[in-house]
Structures are given as structure tokens and as C-alpha cells.
């Protein structure tokens, strides 16, 4: 039987999908808060600067783009300055970035904004799409990153992350269509928070859920990712040395699991935070193959975290901690 995208993504189970999206939103936005790089185009909402950054980023790595972005904006600080410049000067300024047609197209866009819109960028995706040199991704990125509109759009990183979350591994080739992924991008977008969400998806795809080496073992949304079991199986089948490299130096260590527990506690819903979660519930969130026999190990670990002020334990009627005794099953754990 052929496995279709619809069979893997529980589109027919609306409640399960809504709960999954809620968990992904919480996990991804927290990850972004902790890991987002301080990039110059994230500090501004000027559509011209957003446009320049997006065009430069299309085929070039972030680190390489930053100095070119700064220099380009020093030379052409406004959309009018770019529109009025000689094309030869724009191409000269672009030297070193490659894909020089981007420079020419960028200036065509600037000239249309100045000529047709008096230098004021339109805000809607539909109008932005009518500008020369602007495709669906760039239109969505300007609407969202400059005007903070809640619009879905898709680049390579976002496509890969959404596919892995909802449809499973994207290799040897993706099974979901562009339409299905765009629908999911729209459904997952948290209302009123599109800017952070779309930035976070791009950043997550660039730093954590990368094409070749996704950091699954330390991924904060691992429990909600449809690709994780497959990727994990591939990692486990690798020779030990290669696997260690893939998993990172701390995978499987106490330090690693301390981090996982704190990350899981950060992800509790407000109701779970109020009541705490049991050791068994917590265990399944920090260790995919968690078993009854792991309870005592996890008990010791959360006690350590409690001592360090990183976890709070409610233990109505539970005896004082004794490492020689079995872990009390009634205890509830949350962040302090
Ligand atoms: S578990 Fe792996 S594949 Fe899934 S979102 Fe995390 S890093 Fe990506």
C-alpha cells in the first residue's frame, strides 16, 4: 500500500492536530527566544531593508550576507537612492555576493516602488506580488517581517521543518505537496505572532533541523515530530563513532538529560504547570524509550535539579528522598 501524506498527517483528527500545533508553537517560540541570532534585519521593520536582506539571503549564507547588507545600505540608504542609481553602480556594489541578476532585479523592484507607489511599499501580499522581481516567498516575507502581517509563506528551511513535523522524513524525497505544506504553514501560524513564528521557523531550519544533520537528540519538539522515529532509527544504525558525533558530546549523559528535563518543564501547559506532572509523564517527554525501570534514575535526577533550584517537587504524603528506596509514583514536578 502506498503511504500518502494524508495518511501520515492526521488531517482527519482535528483535535489531535490542534493539540500538536499548540505544542509545536510553544516549543518553537521558546526555542527561538533562547537561540535566535541577533541579525541586523531582525532589528528593523523598514520594508526596503527587509527586501534587501531577503534578496541577499536567497542564495547566500547569513554570515556572508551581513557585511554586504551593511555596505549596500550605506551606499543606497533608501529605496529612492537605489531607484535613482546607475545600474552599473548597483552591480559594482553587489560584487562578491554572486548571482548578480539579483542586484538588477532588486533595482527593478525599487524603481517600481518609487515609480508606481511614490516610494511607499504596498503592504498586502497580492500587491507586493505585482512588483517586478518579487515572488511568493519575498512577498510573504515583506508583508510579515516589515508590516507584521500574519501570512504564511515558504522557503527551503520552513518547507523541510514543516514536512518533518507533520509528514515524516523528507528523504529520499518529500511526500507532501507544496499545497499541503502551505496549508499547514497557515494552520500553524499563531494569530498575532506571525513575525516571531516565521522568523523562528527559518532559524530552526537553519540551526537545529538542518538538511543533513538535524540535532534530533537535543530537539525541544522531538516528541511532536513525525520524522523523529525514522531519523532516530537511522542514527542508531550508524557506527558508534559516527553516531556519537551526530548526537553531540553530551548525548545520553546526566548533563544531557538534565537539560532535557528542564526543557520539558518549560514546555508544560499552564494547567500542567499548576498541577505538576508525574515522573512517568515527564520520563516519556525526555526519553523516547522511557520505561518503568527508568523511574528511579529520573527520580534522582529531578531531586538534583530541585537542589539546584531548577525544579519544584510537590510530594503530598511522599516520604523524604532516599536513593535506596523506589521512586515515589505520586510526586508532581514542575518549574519552581
Ligand atoms: S526531531 Fe529532528 S527532524 Fe524533528 S524537528 Fe527536531 S531536529 Fe527536526
Image (spheres, rainbow, N blue to C red):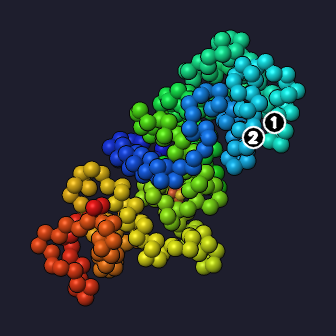
- Tell me if mark 2 has few (under 14), some (14-19) or many (20+) residues whose alpha carbon lies within 10 angstroms of its own: some
Q: Quadrant of the C terminus?
A: bottom left
Q: Whole-percent x and y of residue 251?
A: 51, 73
Secondary structure beneath dot 2 equals helix
Most distant residue in the bottom direction: 324
- What is the count of numbered marks? 2
Mark number, residue 220? none
Badges 1 and 2: C-beta atoms under 8 Å apart?
yes
Mark number, residue 68? 2
The residue sitting at 15% across, 79% down in the picture is: 319
Residue 47, quarter of the rendered image? top right
Q: Whole-percent x and y of residue 25?
A: 42, 46
Judging by the rendered image, the residue that carries numbered circle 1 is 94
Residue 56, quarter of the rendered image? top right
The residue sitting at 30% across, 61% down in the picture is: 335
In the picture, measured across the screen, residue 11 lies left or right of residue 231, that is left
Q: Would you place residue 47 above or below residue 249 in this image?
A: above
The residue sitting at 27% across, 85% down in the picture is: 323
Q: Would you place residue 283 above or below residue 87 in this image?
A: below
In the picture, measured across the screen, residue 113 lies left or right of residue 191, that is right
In the picture, measured across the screen, residue 232 lies left or right of residue 82, that is left
The residue sitting at 53% across, 45% down in the picture is: 201
Amino acid at each position: 500500500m502506498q503511504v500518502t501524506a494524508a495518511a501520515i498527517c492526521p488531517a482527519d483528527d482535528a483535535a489531535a492536530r490542534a493539540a500538536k500545533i499548540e505544542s509545536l508553537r510553544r516549543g518553537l517560540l521558546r526555542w527561538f527566544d533562547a537561540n535566535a541570532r541577533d541579525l541586523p534585519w531582525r532589528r528593523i521593520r523598514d520594508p526596503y531593508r527587509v527586501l534587501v536582506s531577503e534578496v541577499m539571503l536567497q542564495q547566500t549564507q547569513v554570515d556572508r550576507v551581513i557585511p554586504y547588507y551593511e555596505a549596500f545600505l550605506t551606499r543606497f540608504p533608501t529605496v529612492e537612492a537605489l531607484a535613482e542609481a546607475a545600474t552599473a553602480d548597483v552591480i559594482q556594489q553587489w560584487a562578491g555576493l554572486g548571482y548578480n541578476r539579483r542586484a538588477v532585479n532588486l533595482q527593478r523592484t525599487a524603481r517600481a516602488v518609487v515609480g508606481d507607489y511614490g516610494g511607499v511599499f504596498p503592504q498586502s501580499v497580492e500587491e507586493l506580488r505585482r512588483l517586478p522581481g518579487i515572488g511568493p516567498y519575498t512577498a510573504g516575507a515583506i508583508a510579515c517581517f516589515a508590516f507584521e502581517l500574519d501570512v504564511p509563506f515558504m522557503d527551503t528551511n520552513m518547507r523541510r521543518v514543516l514536512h518533518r513535523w507533520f509528514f515524516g522524513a523528507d528523504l529520499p524525497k518529500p511526500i507532501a505537496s507544496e499545497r499541503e505544506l502551505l496549508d499547514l504553514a497557515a494552520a500553524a501560524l499563531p494569530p498575532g505572532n506571525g513575525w516571531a513564528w516565521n522568523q523562528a521557523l527559518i532559524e530552526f531550519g537553519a540551526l537545529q533541523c538542518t538538511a543533513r544533520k538535524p540535532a534530533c537528540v537535543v530537539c525541544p519538539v522531538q516528541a511532536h515530530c513525525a520524522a523523529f522515529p525514522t531519523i532516530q532509527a537511522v542514527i542508531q544504525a550508524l557506527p558508534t563513532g559516527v553516531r556519537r558525533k551526530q548526537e553531540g558530546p553530551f548525548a545520553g549523559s546526566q548533563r544531557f538529560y538534565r537539560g532535557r528535563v528542564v526543557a520539558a518543564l518549560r514546555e508544560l501547559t499552564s494547567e500542567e504547570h499548576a498541577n505538576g506532572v508525574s515522573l512517568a509523564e515527564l520520563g516519556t517527554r525526555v526519553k523516547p524509550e522511557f520505561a518503568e525501570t527508568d523511574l528511579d534514575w529520573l527520580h534522582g535526577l529531578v531531586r538534583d535539579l530541585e537542589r539546584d533550584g531548577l525544579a519544584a517537587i510537590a510530594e503530598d504524603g511522599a516520604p523524604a528522598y532516599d536513593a535506596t528506596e523506589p521512586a515515589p509514583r505520586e510526586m508532581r514536578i514542575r518549574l519552581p
